[in-house]
């Protein structure tokens, strides 16, 4: 059994000992395995300077655990297009590893696509996987569509990662929307007859109001402005219904939330009288 099974990476050993593969595993363990551009500097933006030159801006990327930085804009050559043909070129980060020395190198380049009179396709590249020992790998960053001799605006391929702060804020902050109804007023301690609370991807809709008039079956309980707010959060696939007994009613009344629309309906076979309590709760993950 080896006595070197445990080795301090971020620790003083009196010698150079931290390897690229160790740092790569740490990056993957913290930020996640994959390939993405970091939200730093200019996020490696790409802009056409001329018909034959694309400029890749500053930024940083992660490629299978390796962090690659570009601290000065770089210009790359794009071959001229052909009149009457379409073509997709790719701006890529290419990784190579010297077989004898083990030295790793990263470079930006343009991979030319195949001209066609139909729909252009991206050129095939061998993406590889550095973390599993690939001696070469390619990470597509941008697509440059050419229509004849005219290049279009570059299209980002590699996603831009979110910071831990952004992700934390997205799940820790609760948004509350006060929705209005033409047929209900708040009841009890509620400030609004219908409230939507969103915490990260978890949404909860509270219906807590008193009807202000006699309602027929399938009445739409929210006004158009509130339905528009709801549409941003309820999936179109969501369709839920709840039923409760209501005082002085001989049959149960229901409330249905339908993402196809969306709609918040009263569900009752006969009209519902005014001053009836509406208390329902819907929860979903968007």
Image (tube, rainbow, N blue to C red):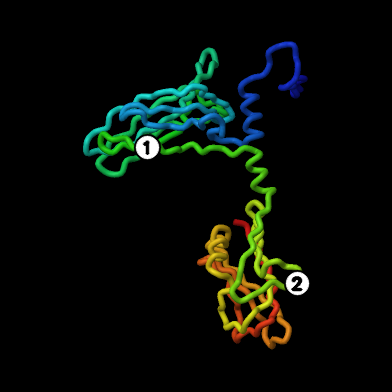
Establish if 122 lies above or below 97. below
Residue 14 image-quadrant placement: top right
Residue at point 62% right, 24% down? 21
Residue 103: image location, x then y, percent: 54, 16
Residue at point 64% right, 25% down? 23
Front one among 3 and 57:
57
Residue 27 image-quadrant placement: top right
Residue 140 can be seen in this image: no
Q: Is residue 283 left or right of residue 92?
A: right
User: Which SS class for mark 1?
Assistant: loop
Residue 165: image location, x then y, percent: 66, 39
User: Could you give the CA–CA distance between mark 1 and mark 2, rounded to whole angstroms?
Assistant: 56 Å
Residue linked to disc 2 = 188
> Where, quadrant-wise, is the N terminus in this rendering?
top right
Front one among 153 and 2:
153
Give the tally of numbered discs: 2
At label 2, counting other C-alpha atoms closer than 10 Å, the crowd grade (few under 14, some 14-19, many 20 or more) is few
User: Which SS class for mark 2?
Assistant: loop
Residue 235: image location, x then y, percent: 55, 60
At label 1, counting other C-alpha atoms closer than 10 Å, the crowd grade (few under 14, some 14-19, many 20 or more) is some
Instruction: Mark 1 or mark 2: name the one nearer the start of the chain.
Output: 1
Which numbered disc, 1 or 2, marks the residue closer to the eye?
A: 2
Residue at point 62% right, 72% down? 241
Establish if 140 lies above or below 197. above
> Where, quadrant-wise, is the C terminus in this rendering?
bottom right
Establish if 205 lies above or below 22. below
Residue 128: image location, x then y, percent: 49, 30
Front one among 115 and 248:
248
Residue 153: image tag: 1
């Amino acid at each position: 059994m080896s006595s070197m099974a445990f080795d301090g990476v971020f620790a003083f050993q009196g010698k150079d000992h931290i390897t690229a593969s160790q740092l790569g595993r740490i990056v993957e363990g913290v930020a996640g395995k994959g390939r993405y551009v970091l939200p730093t500097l200019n996020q490696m933006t790409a802009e056409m300077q001329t018909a034959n030159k694309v400029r890749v801006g500053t930024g940083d990327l992660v490629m299978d655990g390796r962090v690659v930085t570009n601290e000065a804009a770089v210009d790359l050559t794009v071959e001229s297009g052909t009149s009457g043909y379409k073509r997709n070129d790719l701006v890529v980060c290419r990784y190579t590893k010297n077989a004898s020395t083990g030295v790793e190198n990263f470079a930006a380049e343009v991979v030319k696509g195949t001209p066609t009179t139909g729909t252009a396709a991206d050129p095939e590249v061998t993406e590889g996987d550095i973390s599993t020992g690939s001696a070469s790998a390619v990470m597509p960053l941008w697509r440059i569509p050419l229509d004849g001799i005219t290049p279009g605006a570059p299209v980002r391929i590699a996603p831009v990662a979110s910071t831990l702060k952004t992700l934390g804020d997205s799940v820790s902050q609760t948004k509350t929307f006060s929705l209005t109804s033409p047929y209900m007023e708040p009841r009890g301690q509620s400030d609004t007859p219908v409230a939507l609370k969103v915490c990260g991807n978890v949404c909860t809709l509270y219906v807590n109001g008193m009807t202000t008039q006699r309602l027929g079956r399938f009445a739409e309980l929210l006004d158009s402005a509130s339905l528009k707010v709801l549409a941003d959060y309820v999936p179109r696939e969501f369709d839920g219904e709840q039923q409760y007994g209501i005082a002085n009613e001989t049959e149960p009344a229901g409330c249905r939330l339908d993402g196809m629309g969306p709609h918040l309906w009263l569900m009752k076979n006969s009209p519902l009288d005014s001053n009836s309590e509406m208390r329902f709760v819907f929860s979903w993950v968007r």
